[in-house]
Amino acid sequence: MLAQLSTSTGLRAWENWVTSFNEHLLMTEPNANLRKRVSLVIPMFNEGDAIGVLFARLDAILPTLVSYDFEIVCVNDGSTDQTLATLMRASTMRSNLVVVDLSRNFGKEAALSAGLFIATGDAVIPMDADLQDPPEVITDLLAKWEEGFEVVLARRGDRSSDSVAKRFTAQSFYRIHNAVADVEIPADVGDFRLMDRVVVEALNALPEGRRFMKGLFAWVGFKTATIDYRRDVRAAGTSKFNAWKLWNFALEGIFSFSISPLKIWTYLGFFVALAAVGWGSWIAVRTIVWGIDIPGYASVLVGVLLLGGLQLIGIGMIGEYLGRAFLEAKRRPAYVIRKVLRGATGVVRKVGNLNPVTYESRILAELATFEHNEIVHDLPAIFHYWSNTYLRPKIEAFGFSHPDDFFVKQLVKCMARGDGLSRFVSIGAGNCDTEIRVANALREQGHSHFVIECLELNPVMLARGRELAASAGLSAHVVPVQADFNRWTPDGNYHAVMANQSLHHVMNLEGLFDAVATAIKHTNGTLITSDMIGRNGHQRWPEALAIIEELWRELEPRYRYNHQLKRQENNFVNWDCAAEGFEGIRAQDILPLLVDRFHFDLFVPFANVISPFIDRGFGPNFDVNSDTDRAFIDRVHLRDELELGAGRIKPTQMFAVLSLDHSRRSEHPVGLTPEDCIRVPDENMEHVQ
């Protein structure tokens, strides 16, 4: 096709062909040959003795499943033994291990919910740490999943490893529950199963705080298959469920999924009342016919006690439901995550009280934030003063003068490495304004054989992007595509992936970086990014916060008005911008993950303390024409540079070009390698907010 396009065809014919090619790309199904990610979710409470045996069994089976990438999510549910320490040691040697540490013991159901929330796999398999759920069954679960089933249940066909009492009580529970509940739970099926990503998202969106997972698994439905397996004996340790806990667990299942107990007492009350009327009628007839007998105090006492007992049981039954309604009304999360440690990268994510509904609610907040924001990357005048005075000379030493120039020159390098159409994709493109300027600059330099796909979740911003591209005559080169970058799967090869101030909005960084690596590995392509690498939610690390508070005290009140949040901040508020939306949701994880997965061709880090004084919040308070205001910004910048140079604080922003080719030369400022700029969270300082 390319060979048939002669120079006489002209630019219009080429653009028409590119447009047709883009339409084809949008209709193409994701590449079926891409490796799928599978997450194993393993709740643990005092399972320190079982971890070594568990990993040995997993190591024997997972490497044989070469078509999949595995993520092992271990949830420490407030263990008091060596469980957490053992997991932490293991994480230094296993890049695919994710350790989720809950703030206390919340119970297995909550721990399992936390693991499902953190898991990033295309499929998720919950299993027990005691190896009663044999890892060898994973092969059969995956085979059924590949047949198109969204849920694959693992049924205990042989429960000979369980005691007679355990088997009897389990069978009794299933019979009773399924007789009274609205949703039938498959008998002899525990948590061990495979669930497609669509099922996990549905579970994560459920708002319950008290979560009976077997019931929720059944309630969400989806296309289901079942396989049988033999349940093994526990490999190590002892069961954490005694008879009392199992009894309460059974009650939780019934009360969570049925109102039949309330109906039973309604019917019982009716029959007792009917019996009372019948008995009273009999007494009246007997008295009229035979006269009055001597009173029977024993029978009266038995009747009173019987009815009183029934009333108390009924009140207790109502109390069970009322108590659950009371607890749900509080809207407390099912669990609180203290931290998440992601494998050999050493990435520690401080999570706090995220709950299962967080992701969808954050999407709504993000859409609302940008629905009426047409100028996404607009910054106050004082920022441009600072950047032109201090940042521009720094980046010009690396061959570019501003962000657009940075992207243009890197894309030109990518085009020089290939022939024919150069295919680029921009992650989180917003209204495509940056991409349109870049495309226009490329066209002005004589480049026409390229297309930039602009991925964006917000349909309003995509519509603006289409209008801007059309008005600039760039519709053939700039193609807006609605997509969620947390779930993006590349549908082919790309020569470069652009990320302009978008990575710090991504929750599933691991999944996105895997997708980027897949997209560029066959083209010798690059990831080109300008982004934030500071603390989550754009908060300040304690050492930087102390300096900002020191400078803050020098400012007059008129400089302390936050234009973004529309409030006066007489004391600097270390605001967590990720409290509702995605702004800075995992900013501190970006750099460690990039270091672990890519090679840095170029790395230019900058800024920390200066940022709040020149950003959209407080920057408008400073007059770029005021000598006093400029002098203050000059002084803050100098302090920033001194602290960065001494290594007492870390940079919070970067320009970077990354590839999979570790033989390339790496450029960076002296003493500021990517590894040097990683700020590892300090447990002793994390309480500072």
Image (tube, grey):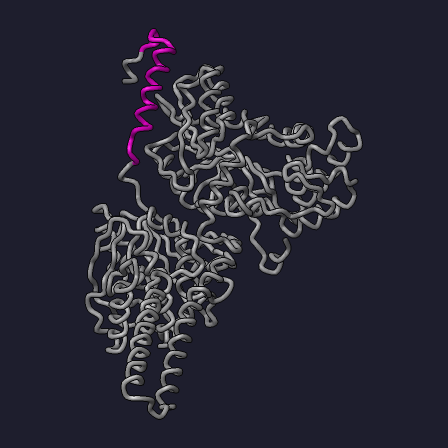
Residue visible at 42% across and 46% down in the picture: 510
Stretch in magenta: 6-30
User: In the depicted view, which residue is nearer to us: 612 or 631?
Assistant: 612
User: In the depicted view, which residue is nearer to us: 581 or 445?
Assistant: 581
Is 300 in the magenta? Answer: no
Residue visible at 32% across and 27% down in the picture: 25
Q: Quadrant of the N terminus?
A: top left
Please say if 168 is above or below 510. Answer: below
Does the rendering let one see residue 611? no
Does the rendering let one see residue 143? yes
- In x, y percent, where is residue 643? 68, 45
User: In the depicted view, which residue is nearer to us: 343 or 477?
Assistant: 477
Please say if 244 is above or below 7. Answer: below
Task: Give the left or right position of residue 328, taking residue 684 as reference.
Answer: left
User: In the depicted view, which residue is nearer to us: 72 or 127?
Assistant: 127
Task: Give the left or right position of residue 385, taking residue 276 as reference.
Answer: right
